[in-house]
Structure formats: structure tokens, C-alpha cells
Amino acid sequence: MALPMVHLLAAWAWAQDKPELRENPDYYLGAISPDAIHIRDGGDKSRKDEFHLHNWRRPAPDEVLAYWMEHFTPFDLGYGIHVLLDGQWAVGFRRCFPGMLLPNGKPDPKIYYNDTCITDFELYHTSKLTPFLMDMVMRGRAPEDHPLLTRREFELWRRDTMAFYDRACPMSDPVRYIDRKYVEAFLRDCTEMMTETYERRCKLLNNTQKSILERRSTRGFSEEALTEAEIRNLADAALASPTACNYQDWHFSFVTDRALLEEFSREYRAGMLAQLAAEGADLQRKYAGYDVFFNAPLAVFITLPEAPRSRFAQVDAGIAVENLALSAQGMGLGSVILGRPMDVFRSGTGGDWERRFGFPEGHHYAIGIVIGHPTVTKEAHPVGENKLHFVQAEA
């Protein structure tokens, strides 16, 4: 149906309010990948509807929703965006250009492929986004465990897509119907269905799953203090975290004294800059104003006794800090988990800081988190290769 530049420009437009996708190479590779069916079947289109989630001839957003409920990586989002566009594309040009259709209702292939090819080449050669889009496609990673196509097929289709533009346009007749003006109008209209389908998927997620998928590490906070109710909710989440044998070795110190946190941060910064002295002045200038707490209004220190009852106490502390991070996300707050304060707590002044922060006698810093109203955002980190597999009983 639509050729690659139409798909990539639509993917780019839809991702503009989604920073986790806007510059994600996997997403853009996914946005051309349903057509990798041509690597498997060549010119045989008998299974194309199946591999386009039944969106090849008409929109079928429910099929994409079902796919996204099971597969929701950036690549999968791009895959779904591709097929949602194709379903609308097929209906749109038939409605707008009846003169292009044969008596059987199918488009005249000579006219259709001439128009789409010339217009797609024009978009490729004139769009300011082309270098960015091609770079994204080239750097995208195909999944190893896609439910429909193989990684090799995706990679071969990428190769063929890039080679498609590395030549003169093979068509030369005058464009009669599907011109650039039509494509640009179509691109403005087609994203509504994409957004509706995506939002339906988000609504079907339970709130906890949504918080897990949307949380990012925040390294910039406003000075706005948290309310007592917010802090109490966070404390409840911390205390509700599970521990091995219910030993509850951990203890939580909630610190909102910014002057005290700033003093601690100055000491941390001085030690860090001393270590960076050998690295050069540029690096020292970069960290001259570093705040280990990122100006957050709340720091929570999780501590453990020197000899905890449970051999899994460190694991329990890690579980607790994740409870706090997800609770914060669910309340619309940002957070970042901290290991760096350990450097100060293990220094010669560590005991003094333990007392000043009110750690229980004999307790030492295990891990921490700061929480507040975020002033910065970031994209999700791409997941590395070979991080997941399933072990199932043989049929």
C-alpha cells in the first residue's frame, strides 16, 4: 500500500508528543517492517492481510489493540502504526479517486504504482526529515522473537528499503491522483486512529503496570514541597514492601530538610571533585555545581543493621526502593534511585551523617531515592539484546 516515506513521516508525526519514541531507532524500523512479508513471500500478497493484522484493505484497530496488549516495545508500536496507516490508506484513496479504480474495485496497478512511487521519491528527496529518518531505520534493532516475522526478514527488508531509494525513480508518467498534496493531507488525518488505539491500550492497563512502563529516572526537580498526604502515601508504600521471612530489617529515613541535604551534597561534591582532579579542568567545571539529590524536596534513606537477620536484606532494600519509585510515579511525581551517597556514608564523616539523619543505632546506608516534581524528562533506555527468553513445556 503506502510506500516507506509515507509510513516514516506518519510515524514521526505521531511520535512528537512521545519523547520515548521520537528518536527511538527501533520504533522507526518497526514502522516499515510489516512489509518484510515480501522477503518471505515475494510478490505473493495472499498473506499480506494476515501480517498487517488485517489492516491491509480496511482499518482494523481492534486487531492492533490485541497485538499491542501482548507486544508493546517501541518496535511493536512502530509495527502497529504502520498497519493502522495502511488500513486508512486503502479506504482513503478508493474514496477520493474512483477514477483510478478498475471495474473490480481494485486500483489500476499501472496508475497506482506510478503515482505512489513518484510521490514517495519526491518526499524522500525533498523532506528535511529524510536524513534523520533513514538514520533511525539503519540503527534500529529487529527483535529476535517477533510473533509473525523473523529478525533476518526484518533486516533484509531494511536493506531493500534503503536500496530502493539508491537509484533514480523507476516511474516517469505524470502523477494523476496520489500527489504530494494528497499525501500531506492524509498524514494530517491518519494519526487520530493511531492515538485512539494507543489510548485504548493504555486505559486497559492496570495502574501499576502503567506506572512501571512510564516511570523514568528524574534528575531535575522543582523546589515545590511534597504535601503531608503525599509523604504519608510514600511511607505506606515503603512499609508495605515485602521482606524475606517478614524480618523487616530495613528502616526508612524521610528527609525534607533541604539545608541538611545541601550540606551533605557539598561534602559529596568536594570528594568527587578531588577524585576528578586528575581528569582535567573541563570535567571539574562540568560537576562544579553537582547536587547528588538533584534539588529534590524529599530524600528517603533506606538503612540496614550491620548484622541483619535475613541474608536477603539487601534484596529487601531494593524491593522497597522500587515500591517508593512506583508509588511516586502513580502520584504524578518523579524519582531517581541513588547509590552515590554511599561514598559519604563510608567516609570518615559517615557516622556523623548517620546520626544527623536519624539512622537507628547500628544502621548503615543501603540505598536511597529522591522524589519530587520533575522539571526534566527523558526517553526510556532501549533494552539490550538477549535479555528475555521463555522456557516452555514441549507440546
Image: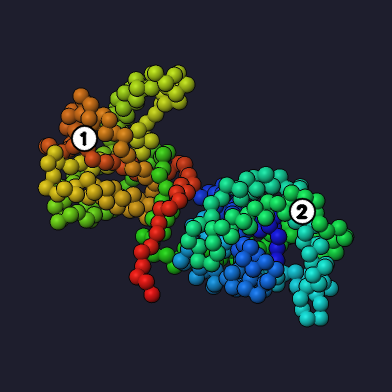
35 vs 331: above or below: below
Q: Would you name the residue on which mark 2 appears?
A: 121
Report the mark closest to the observer, 2 or 1: 2
Residue 26: which disc?
none
Mark drawn on residue 357 = 1
Residue 1 appears left or right of 325: right
Q: CA distance from mark 2 to mark 1?
A: 64 Å
The kind of residue tagged 2 is Phe
Earlier in the chain: of badge 2 and badge 1, it is 2
Residue 174 horizontal/vertical position (percent) = 88, 60
Disc 1 element:
loop
Instruction: Point out the image quarter for the C terminus.
Output: bottom left
Residue at the image position 65 percent from the left and 75 percent from the top:
46
Q: Nearer the viewer, residue 136 or 235?
A: 136
Quarter of the image where one finds residue 308: top left
Q: Is residue 85 visible?
A: no
**Residue type, numbered disc 1:** Phe
Total label count? 2
Image point (82%, 65%), residue name:
177
Q: Nearer the viewer, residue 53 or 297?
A: 53
Say if 367 sits above or below 188 in the image.
Answer: above
- The residue furthest bottom is 104
Residue 21 place in picture, x, y as percent: 54, 51
